[in-house]
């Protein structure tokens, strides 16, 4: 039996894609659907954004690319992470494009050369002479969400190194850059987090015209009254000062509700309620105003509670929270709608 339910609104994904296409003003939208579409379902999201005009699907691994190729025989699929050996052969056979950040350029497969300009991770220190296999040139911006000046420095280095190759597709922008740094949009922008209606800046997505696509719900499994001095959860981190009602929700860090999200809020009967005590592997405790029946719905994300709200409490990013929500037979059921 499922402990919670994820609802993915593909209508919201479509509207976010349209918003990004509008912002890009003629640059191509390349949809980043790695990590199973940031937990939203890569195949479902890919179909929605291709229908709205995205011209490529970007993933982290060849395995992810092969899954998409099985569903979308003619779509442009770009692997952004490293690949080698057997993976290169599989990509060649499946007409999947690869990113080259070090080593030789393989033959017989279309590739993008990734230039290191300041991210300090994967990337070529210098741009080699492109071979016939090279179809694109790219870099990765490190601070588009927090330091515009450094992002512009990276763009300057990239444009100087690639200016002689205008016949190749050049791409550098992520969601943050696409939304706030017009100079970064170039020929294409690789947008991920914004497609899902999540803010790359950790703020309310509505500020950038985005609409969250994911809703996460559960229910009260048990309601109990704590007498003064009684506690709930490991370590007795919450002890009642007075008679207190709490609700136990059958979701915990094994479901993706992180252990350091104690103190965040969820919605119970239309009211925001604090998560108290230690988040367990399979349960959280929620402070209630009074007694409620077991089965009362609890909204973990949605109804005004944003993934960004939880991320601030946990001192992390919304990317991590949504991509780590567990779905499947023993955890959360994922339902897809197109509203």
Image (cartoon, helix red, strand yellow):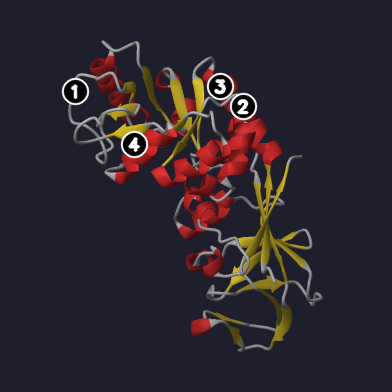
Q: Residue furthest front?
A: 93
Horizontal and vertical percent for residue 275? Answer: 61, 68
Q: Residue 231, relative to residue 40: is it above or below?
A: below
Sequence order check: which comes first, mark 4 or mark 2?
Answer: 2
Residue behind mark 4:
142
Q: Please report whichever mark, 1 or 3, sits nearer to the chain's N-terminal start.
A: 3
Image position, residue 283 (x, y; %): 60, 75
Residue on which disc 1 sits: 128
Q: Is residue 240 above or below residue 250?
A: below
* Residue 258 in the figure: left or right of residue 338: left
Q: Is residue 5 above or below residue 148?
A: below
Callout 4: SS: loop
Number of the front mark, 2 or 1? 1
Mark 2 falls on what kind of element? helix
- Residue 157 position in % (x across, y down): 25, 22
Q: CA distance from mark 2 to mark 3?
A: 6 Å
* Kind of element beneath mark 3: helix
Report which quarter residue 140 is drawn in. top left
* Position of the C terminus by quadrant: top right
Q: Is residue 14 left or right of residue 134?
A: right
Residue position for label 2: 19
Please state, as top left, top right, bottom left or bottom right, where the N terminus lies in the image. bottom right
Report the residue that reaches farthest toward the right: 293
Query: Residue 237, image x and y in percent?
Result: 52, 79
Rate crowding at label 1 as few (under 14), some (14 to 19) or many (20 or more) other CA atoms within 10 Å. Answer: few
- Tag 4: Cα neighbours inside 10 Å, few (<14), some, or many (≥20)? some
Question: What is the CA distance from the residue labelled 3 to the residue labelled 4?
Answer: 21 Å
Q: CA distance from mark 4 to mark 1?
A: 23 Å
Q: Say which label, 4 or 1, has the lower sequence index.
A: 1
- Residues at marks 1 and 3, CA–CA distance in whole angstroms: 32 Å
Residue that badge 3 annotates: 23
């Amino acid at each position: 039996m499922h402990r919670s339910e994820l609802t993915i609104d593909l209508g919201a994904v479509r509207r976010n894609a349209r918003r990004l296409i509008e912002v890009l003003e003629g640059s191509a939208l390349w949809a980043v659907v790695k990590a199973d579409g940031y937990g939203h379902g890569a195949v479902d999201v890919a179909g929605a954004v291709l229908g709205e005009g995205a011209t490529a699907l970007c993933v982290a691994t060849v395995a992810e690319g092969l899954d998409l190729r099985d569903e979308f025989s003619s779509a442009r699929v770009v692997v952004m992470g490293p690949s080698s050996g057997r993976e290169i052969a599989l990509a060649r056979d499946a007409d999947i494009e690869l990113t080259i950040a070090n080593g030789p350029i393989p033959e017989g497969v279309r590739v993008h050369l990734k230039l290191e300009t300041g991210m300090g991770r994967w990337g070529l220190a210098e741009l080699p002479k492109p071979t016939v296999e090279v179809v694109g040139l790219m870099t990765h911006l490190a601070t588009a969400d927090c330091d515009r000046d450094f992002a512009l420095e990276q763009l300057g280095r990239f444009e100087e190194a690639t200016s002689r190759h205008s016949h190749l597709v050049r791409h550098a922008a992520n969601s943050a850059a696409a939304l706030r740094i017009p100079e970064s949009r170039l020929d294409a922008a690789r947008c991920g987090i914004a497609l899902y209606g999540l803010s790359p800046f950790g703020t309310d997505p509505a500020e950038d015209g985005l609409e969250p696509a994911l809703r996460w719900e559960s229910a009260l499994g048990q309601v109990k009254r704590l007498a003064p001095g009684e506690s709930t959860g490991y370590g007795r981190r919450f002890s009642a000062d007075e008679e207190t009602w709490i609700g136990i929700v059958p979701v915990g860090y094994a479901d993706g509700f992180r252990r350091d999200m104690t103190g965040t809020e969820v919605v119970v009967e239309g009211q925001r309620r604090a998560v108290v005590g230690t988040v367990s592997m399979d349960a959280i405790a929620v402070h209630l105003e009074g007694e409620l029946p077991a089965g009362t719905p609890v909204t973990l994300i949605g109804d005004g509670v944003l993934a960004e709200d939880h991320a601030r409490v946990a001192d992390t990013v919304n990317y991590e929270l949504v991509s780590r929500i567990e779905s499947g037979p023993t955890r959360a059921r994922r339902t897809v709608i197109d509203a």
